Amino acid sequence: MKQYLLSILFLFSLFSLKAQDITLKVWPDGAPNHNGMNEPEEKFEGVRVRNVSEAEMYVYLPEMEKNTGAAVVICPGGGYWIEAMDHEGFEMAEWLRDKGVAGIVLKYRLPYGHHEIPSGDARQALRIVRKNAAEWGINPDKIGIAGSSAGGHLAATVGTRFDSGSSEGSNAFSAISSRPDFMLLLYPVITFREEFGHMGSRKNLIGEGNDWQLVEKYSNELHVSPDTPPTFLVLADDDRSVVPRNSVEFYLALKENEVPAEMHIFSEGGHGFGMTKKNLPVDQWPDLFYSWLKAINVIE
């Protein structure tokens, strides 16, 4: 019996080492707006969630001897109607932590007709990381954002529309910049233009119809500027869900604005590969991303 209890404690300690270090609410005092979802949050198909009405952050901090000072806020994908928290979230955070980079998984509120909700949560998450940077061993100038699929659209929205903070704001976060220092975009939805956009994500974020102002607002290739952060893009040529032109147009816009960028288009991988190992060349992307972080001097 004693040996059994020791084995259970050992297994529990291993699990604890893999779990996130900190869980916190993005809006502990209540969000400034409501996304209209009043049904209970629901988990399904492993670690996927829907009916998300409260944003949370799951913080994975590296060991002190491994710590590079860099951090990544991770936005899982799911077409703006679910969030794939596992292979596009927690697994990525664990891999980053093992590499000495803090991984912060963001469970953002889903829009349900309120298009400003997800990006508002993501900007606030970046501010929270910067506010806690010293305590968490993070360099406030080395905080990036990552996103997969619709999460990539969210990350690109924040990377092209951010604020530098204002001392005239009404709370402790108002003066903190929401600009990410770099971006990692995995098979991202970029545009809402009908020619090559992902109409499911568009419908779930901005609704039915053809409101060009909203289509333009969330077609991120149209909002790249010289201030857009350096970007690393990963996708597969055989992606039939979010066609490669999304990433290509974004890359071209980055180059037009002289923003440092690197793009990898693998021959196979389809859509939604995340951190899943498929024995395909696409499995190389995490190590390539880590090398790119070195190339842009985010890590040594």
Image (spheres, grey):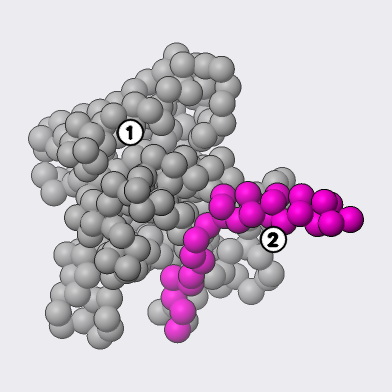
Taking the image as drawn, is residue 217 in sight? no
Q: Residue at x 46, y 16 (%)?
A: 281
Report how far apart the C-alphas of labels 2 and 1 lie in the structure.
34 Å
Q: In x, y percent, where is residue 39?
A: 68, 70
Q: Quadrant of the N terminus?
A: bottom right
Quadrant in the rendering for residue 49: bottom right
Say which amino acid is labelled 2.
Answer: Glu
Judge whether 171 appears above or below 282 on screen: below
Taking the image as drawn, is residue 187 in sight? yes
Q: Nearer the viewer, residue 201 or 88?
A: 88
Examine the structure image and report whether residue 25 is included in the region drawn in magenta: yes
Q: In x, y percent, where is residue 209?
A: 46, 52
Q: Quadrant of the C terminus?
A: top left
Can you identify the residue that label 1 sits on?
290
Find the magenta span and give its range. Answer: 1-29
Say which amino acid is labelled 1.
Answer: Tyr
Q: In x, y percent, where is residue 217?
A: 30, 53
Q: Residue at x 25, y 45 (%)?
A: 182
Q: Nearer the viewer, residue 96 or 88?
A: 96
Q: Residue furthest right?
A: 1
Q: Residue at x 33, y 33 (%)?
A: 290
Q: Are there few (<14), some (14-19), or many (20+) residues within 10 Å of tag 2?
A: few
Q: Residue furthest front?
A: 2
Marked residue nearer the N-terminal end (2 or 1)? 2
Can you identify the residue that label 2 sits on?
42
Judge whether 61 appears above or below 254 on screen: below
Judge whether 42 appears above or below 252 on screen: below
Examine the structure image and report whether residue 75 is included in the region drawn in magenta: no
Q: Is residue 296 left or right of residue 48?
A: left
Quadrant in the rendering for residue 258: top left
Q: In x, y percent, where is residue 30?
A: 47, 81
Judge whether 270 appears above or below 64 on screen: above
